[in-house]
């Protein structure tokens, strides 16, 4: 991979609390990744269209309410258009029983409150098989 890791940072559903998403997006950018940041309240079809247009490597979804429960629908929508190879990560408030459901749906990793930004960045770099020169 000769280009920076490209990450879409987004929020789906009705949760408008985006401070955490903005902080993580900044950490990705500071690590040398290319970041596409959307406003909150994205629909699944909007996220799929952005991925089709931007060809991001990772979809990072922030959830502080229960909007993570619609992520399996996003995973299905990605499969329908041939994008099942895109890695999806989720960060925020996710109960243990919901984490298992997300992982079974194809989510690569779930990050919980208290996770360090360095750890999140390192995890994404590992997922992509690359460490960005800092």
Image (cartoon, rainbow, N blue to C red):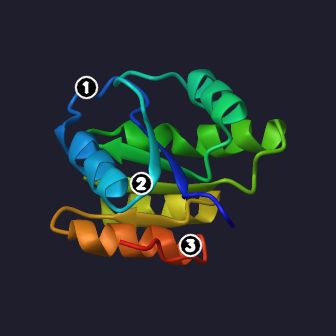
Q: Quadrant of residue 97?
A: bottom left
Where disc 3 sits, the SS reads helix
- Please report whichever mark, 2 or 3, sits nearer to the chain's N-terminal start: 2
Q: Nearer the viewer, residue 9 or 71?
A: 9
Q: Position of residue 43 (x, y in %)?
A: 52, 22
Figure quadrant of residue 121: bottom left
* Residue where numbered disc 3 is placed: 127
Provide residue 101's location: percent of width, then percent of height: 52, 60
Q: Are marks 2 and 3 in contact (CB under 8 Å)?
A: no
Question: Distance of mark 2 from mark 3, alpha carbons?
Answer: 14 Å
The crowding category of the residue bearing disc 3, from other C-alpha atoms within 10 Å (few below 14, some 14 to 19, many at least 20), is some
How far across and down, in percent of the image, does residue 19 sit?
17, 38
Q: Which residue is mark 2?
A: 90
Which residue corresponds to mark 1?
A: 16
Up/down of 52 relative to 108, above or below:
above
Whether residue 64 is visible, yes or no, is no
Write the residue at 46% across / 23% down: 42
In the foreground, 7 or 71:
7
Q: Is residue 40 above or below residue 19?
A: above
**Is there any visible trace of residue 4 in the rendered image?**
yes
């Amino acid at each position: 991979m000769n280009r920076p890791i490209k990450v879409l940072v987004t929020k789906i559903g009705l949760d408008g609390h985006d401070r955490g998403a903005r902080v993580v997006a900044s950490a990705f950018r500071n690590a040398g990744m290319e970041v596409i940041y959307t406003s909150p309240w994205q629909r699944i079809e909007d996220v799929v269209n952005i991925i089709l247009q931007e060809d991001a490597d990772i979809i990072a979804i922030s959830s502080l309410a229960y909007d993570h429960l619609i992520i399996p629908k996003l995973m299905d929508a990605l499969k329908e258009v041939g994008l099942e190879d895109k890695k999806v990560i989720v960060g925020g408030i996710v109960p243990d029983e919901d984490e298992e459901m997300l992982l079974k749906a194809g989510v690569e990793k779930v990050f919980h409150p208290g996770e360090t930004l360095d750890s999140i960045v390192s995890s994404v770099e590992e997922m992509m098989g690359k460490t960005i020169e800092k």
